[in-house]
Structure formats: structure tokens, C-alpha cells
Amino acid sequence: MSDVLTSTTPVVTIADIESAHERIASTVVRTPTIACPALSRLTGAEITLKLENLQAIGSFKERGAANKMALLTPEERARGVITVSAGNHAQGVARQASLLGIDATIVMPRFTPATKVAATQAWGANVVLAGDDFAQASETAAELQKQDGRVLVHPFNDPAVIAGQGTAALELLEDAPDIDTVVVPVGGGGLIGGFATVMAALRPDVEVIGVQVEAYASLSNYPQEDGPTQGGSTIAEGIAVTRLGDHCLNAFRNKISKILVVSELQVESSITTLAEKAKQVCEGAGATGLAAVLAYPELFKGRRVALPLSGGNINARILANTILRSLLRDGRILRLIFQIPDRPGMLADISARIGNYGGNIIEVSHHRLFASPSVQTAELLVMVEARDTEHAHQIETDLARHYIVRRD
């Protein structure tokens, strides 16, 4: 076991976090903390949101980068910095480097979305694309650091980074002192390490709960030792970390109550719910807190729950597809396939029936030659928007009285 984990000396203290808060105040946004009545009605809990998606780079990650880089000596700043990240931390380091006049190299996996690469380069950093995932990119970063002598700004496993992330918890308590529960996304463990340290020192009555996504649920047996993860693609790529940092584990071990695990579909639905109910654009990792509240309602009903929306950097196409998938699952968008006689007036009749019920036709696709079982029939695919699940059922039921129709 790591010496860090067996040590009784905390790697991060409340004093470290309070000092970090003063240190980074001029370069990091003090994000709003808001009550969300719509989510409160939905969940049965009193929901408060800490809007880290409104940071300058769209993520809490800049807090840790800012604190680490502010602590660098003049000699270290002259050497430059290097980090490895698939997005949010990369942008945080790049922005802080531009503000401090430090040369920065960012190693990103080769398949990082182009928007995140461009956003990082826009802050003036040198981006190196290497490896298929975080682990392989980290190997390249280690080689470059050895060659160039740069200072590593680790995405999570650094006491100064953890202290920076904890500053969000300080602000949360100042703005919402009545909370009794906080649900924090867990990837490398820096954010929950900071939150757990703050709550243990200032509000030990507040329950700290971590949340991971299924493919990267290394702490699913907490408080037992972390185990292997399945890995692979996830919409919560911001917490797609196979192994937590030792410093992070030291910071939150014995200070949190439990780790909850949520599915991909639960995260997708929460992204949609945040957009609709809270009017907040949130990336997958940032939506996991709400996903946990919705997945385990018995744990949160009647409680005063704070959710840090850790980031809002989601690709516009992914956001649009996620919302559409959620609407399809909820039944608010119907994909209906009709087998109809191939004669005039059929499409007009179907459209009229849908319109009479208040449905909104989004898309129509008409196939005569190959999709139909008979040359005398045609297949019609109609995508319809409904108000809610019950409204969708009414539309489908009426159409089924007159046509052969099935839901796709």
C-alpha cells in the first residue's frame, strides 16, 4: 500500500484550502450557488446547485490548476509546465499559463474531441496528441517532462490541486449554509478530496456522497479498497479514470459516507433534466450528482442536497443527441412505422389525425420499393413530438385503430 495512504498526516488541510481560496480569487470565477425549485419538486429533496459550469473554462478544474501554478517558484515558472488531460484540466492549465506568462505543453489523447483541442490551443498552449487514452497520454507526458524539465501539473493527484478544488466547497458553505448533504462526482478524486476536507473541518454534520459511472466504478465497494474498472466509452468522460490518486484517497478516506454508481442512461437523462428543469448546460460528469439523486430517491427525500455541476463542456452534437435519446425513452418523441395502402390521401389522413390530437410532426420518411412487404403497400416512418408520455400514448392508440402501426 502507498505510504500516502498509510500516513496519518493529512495531505490537505482546511488551512491549505482557505489559503488557496485567497490565492486564486483574482483569476478564478466565484461561481453562483442557486436553489432549484424545479429539481426540488422532481426529486422530493431541496436541491441547491453550485454552478462550476460557469467558470471561464467551463469547469471546476481551473481552481486546482490556478492554485498549483500560483505556488510555482520563479525558477519553476521559467522551466514551463506540462500536463496530461482530455479536456477540462488542459484548458485550466492553458488559461492560467497564459495569465501568468508560463510556457505550457498539454498532452491529450489522440481521439480527444477537436473542440477541446481547439479550446486548449486558443489559450496559447502547445498541444501534443498522443496515445489512445489517458494512461497512454500520461506515458508521453512523463517522457516529455523528463526531456524538457518542465513542472508537472497533475490533473488530480497533487495536494495543491486538491486544495484548489476544495475552494468550491468553501464558497458553497458560505452561500448555502443549511445544506445537509453534498453529492460529488468522482474521477481521479481531487474534487471529492477537497469537498470532504472542507466538510470534515467546518461542517462534519454534512454527509458527503461520491458518485461514479458504471464503466469506471473503482470505488463501488467503498470503504473497501478500490478495484478494477470495466473502462470504455462513457458520456461522463470527465470522470473516466481507471485509478484514483493516492493523495486524493488520503484526502477523502473516512470522511465520506458512501459511493453511488449510476448508469450511462441515467447520466444522459440527467443532462436532459438539467437543461429542461434547471436551464443549465452540463457535461456528463457534472450531471452524475443529479443522476444519483434520481436513481436512489430514498436516500435523499426530504434532505437539503447540494450538487456541484462540475462542468459544462459538452459537444453540441452530443448534447443534441442526448436530449433526443432522452425524449425518445420518455415517450415524448415517437418514431412510428406504418404499413399503409399505396394510394393517394394516406399521408394527409395520418397527418390530420396526429394534428387533431395536438401532436407535432418532426420528420416523415416514405418508402415504396424495398421496405414494404407488398408491392401494394408502402412503409411510412413518422417522428412525432408529444407533450408527455400520456399524450404520446393517446396519439399512438388512436392511430392504431385505423392503421397497422408500431413504435420503432
Image (tube, rainbow, N blue to C red):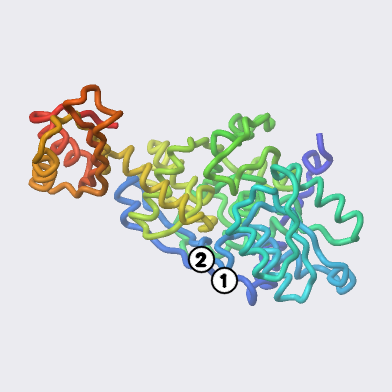
Relative height, residue 146 to residue 23 (above, below): above
Q: Is residue 146 visible?
A: yes
User: Closest to the observer: 224 or 157?
Assistant: 157
Among the 4 quarters of the image, the one containing residue 1: top right
Q: How many marks?
A: 2
Residue 34 percent location from the top left of the image? 42, 63
In the image, 202: left or right of 134? left
Q: Residue at x 70, y 72 (%)?
A: 23
On-image quarter of the C terminus? top left
**Compared to 60, does 297 lie above or below?**
above
Q: Where is 352 relative to 62, above or below?
A: above
Which one is closest to the eye, mark 2 or mark 1?
Answer: 2
- The picture places residue 24, in percent across and down from the top left corner, at 67, 71
Residue under the image location 37 percent in, 49 percent down: 273
Check disc 2 and report its element: helix, strand or loop.
helix
Tag 2 near tag 1, CB within 8 Å: yes
Which residue sits furthest top? 373
Going by the numbered disc 1, the residue's amino acid type is Val
Residue at screen point 66% across, 42% down: 241
Secondary structure beneath dot 1 equals loop
Q: Can see residue 159?
A: no
| Residue 6 on image: x %, y % | 80, 39
Position of residue 234 in the picture relative to residue 340 (left or right): right
Q: Which mark is residue 54?
A: 2
Q: Amino acid at mark 2?
A: Leu
How packed mark 1 is, by other alpha carbons closer than 10 Å (few <14, some 14-19, many 20 or more), is some
In the image, residue 152 above or below residue 333: below
Task: Tell me which numbered mark, 2 or 1, is placed earlier along the sequence.
Answer: 1
Residue at 66% x, 52% y: name it.
86
Per the image, the residue denoted by label 1 is 29
